[in-house]
Image (cartoon, rainbow, N blue to C red):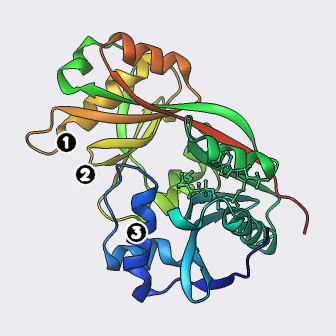
């Protein structure tokens, strides 16, 4: 059944509605305050209204030829009657309008309704992302690294190299840098980037956390531990498509928190 729905662009006054939908995602990220939401998320956000009531919410980021679907939520009492499909149709229209041909997203492995919705739109699992939590003393249990690595910040001049090294979309680092309160850290070996993390002191944790080889996890974490707020006992890491590093962290006592599937596909034609 198709329901008549109106697309509503996001504006500052929608922060309370956004907060209700955001809570449905079941993520640990702190709720962005109205200023941050208006600046960083609202430009890529739209709602769907049914008879004047907001029943659907989606947040999209665009990186060149790739559309990154960040959030898709339908109000609980409006599920199972096509609002999710309508959100995907509008997202596809926006991705196509931006000239992109691929779209992708992350979804928790146990979220069957959402995975079924995304597969219906041609998306397929590309890799698994592990979210793990390592106690701060656990960093010393990781194998040491003898490679001559040096810690560096990430100036804009290094963005393209880091994005290439870890298959990040063009413009991703500029986007991460624009978010308030985050630190970007990398390790270089003979001036070549071999590890990169975006650290958020609020968890505290890293998303993303990329290393060229598992042995680089320890020197990268040694840069991040001093940035953890006083009283923190663990650091949370989101590790994409890297089973070796995940295994090394689990062997050092890290606790698995949850798993995420990375889905991607061609955007369906209009
Ligand atoms: C996932 C979600 C957006 C689906 O919205 P919805 O409006 O119920 O979806 P629709 O009614 O448009 O259904 C579209 C498709 O989704 C899938 N789907 C929806 N609910 C499902 C369920 N309970 N079980 C299995 N598949 C389901 C089906 O493939 C369905 O296709 P069909 O209609 O041909 O059967 C909604 O359940 C939701 O908001 N969940 C909470 C937030 C969330 O987890 N978002 C995803 C984060 S990545």
- N-term-proximal mark, 3 vs 1: 3
Q: Position of residue 75 (x, y in %)?
A: 52, 67
Residue 89 seen anywhere in this rendered image of the structure: yes
Q: Which residue is at the front of the view, 78 or 214?
A: 78
Whole-percent x, y for residue 49 in the image: 60, 82
Q: Taking 13 as reference, is 222 left or right?
A: left
Q: Nearer the viewer, residue 241 or 176?
A: 241
Q: Residue at x 14, y 45 (%)?
A: 229
Q: Please give the name of the residue rendered at 42% of the width and 77% of the height, measured from the top-left corner.
A: 17
State how far apart marks 3 and 1 are (Cα): 29 Å
Reading the image, the residue beneath label 3 is 20
**Does the residue at mark 3 contact the one at mark 1 (Cβ under 8 Å)?**
no
Return the disc, 2 or 3, that comes first in the chain's sequence: 3
Dot 1: few (<14), some (14–19), or many (≥20) neighbours within 10 Å?
Answer: some
As drawn, 195 above or below 205: above
Q: Is residue 147 left or right of residue 106?
A: left
Residue 202 tag number: 2
Q: Quadrant of residue 223?
A: top left
Quadrant in which the C terminus is drawn: bottom right
Identify the element where label 3 is drawn.
helix
Q: Secondary structure at mark 1?
A: loop
Residue position marked by numbered label 1 in the rendering? 228
Q: Secondary structure at mark 2?
A: loop
């Amino acid at each position: 059944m198709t329901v008549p729905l109106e697309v509503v662009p996001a504006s500052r006054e929608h922060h309370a509605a956004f907060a209700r939908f955001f809570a449905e995602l079941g993520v640990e990220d702190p709720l962005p305050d109205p200023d941050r939401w208006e600046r960083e998320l609202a430009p890529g956000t739209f709602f769907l209204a049914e008879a004047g009531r907001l029943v659907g919410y989606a947040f999209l980021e665009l990186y060149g030829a790739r559309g990154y679907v960040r959030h898709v939520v339908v109000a609980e009492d409006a599920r199972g009657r096509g609002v999710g499909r309508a959100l995907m149709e509008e997202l596809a229209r926006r991705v196509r309008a931006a000239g992109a041909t691929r779209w992708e997203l992350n979804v928790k492995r146990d979220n069957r309704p959402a995975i079924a919705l995304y597969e219906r739109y041609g998306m397929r699992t590309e890799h698994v992302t592990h979210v793990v939590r390592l106690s701060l003393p656990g960093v010393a249990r990781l194998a040491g690294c003898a490679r001559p690595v040096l810690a560096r910040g990430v100036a804009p001049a290094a963005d393209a190299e880091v994005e290439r090294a870890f298959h990040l979309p063009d413009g991703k680092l500029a986007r991460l840098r624009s978010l308030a309160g985050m630190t970007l850290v990398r390790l270089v070996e003979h001036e070549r980037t071999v590890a990169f993390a975006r650290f958020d002191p609020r968890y505290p944790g890293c998303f993303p956390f990329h290393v060229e080889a598992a042995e680089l996890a320890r020197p990268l974490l040694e840069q991040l531990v001093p940035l953890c707020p006083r009283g923190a006992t663990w650091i949370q890491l989101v590790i994409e498509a890297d089973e070796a590093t995940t295994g090394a962290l689990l062997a050092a006592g890290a606790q698995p928190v949850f798993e995420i599937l990375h889905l991607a596909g061609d955007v369906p034609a209009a």
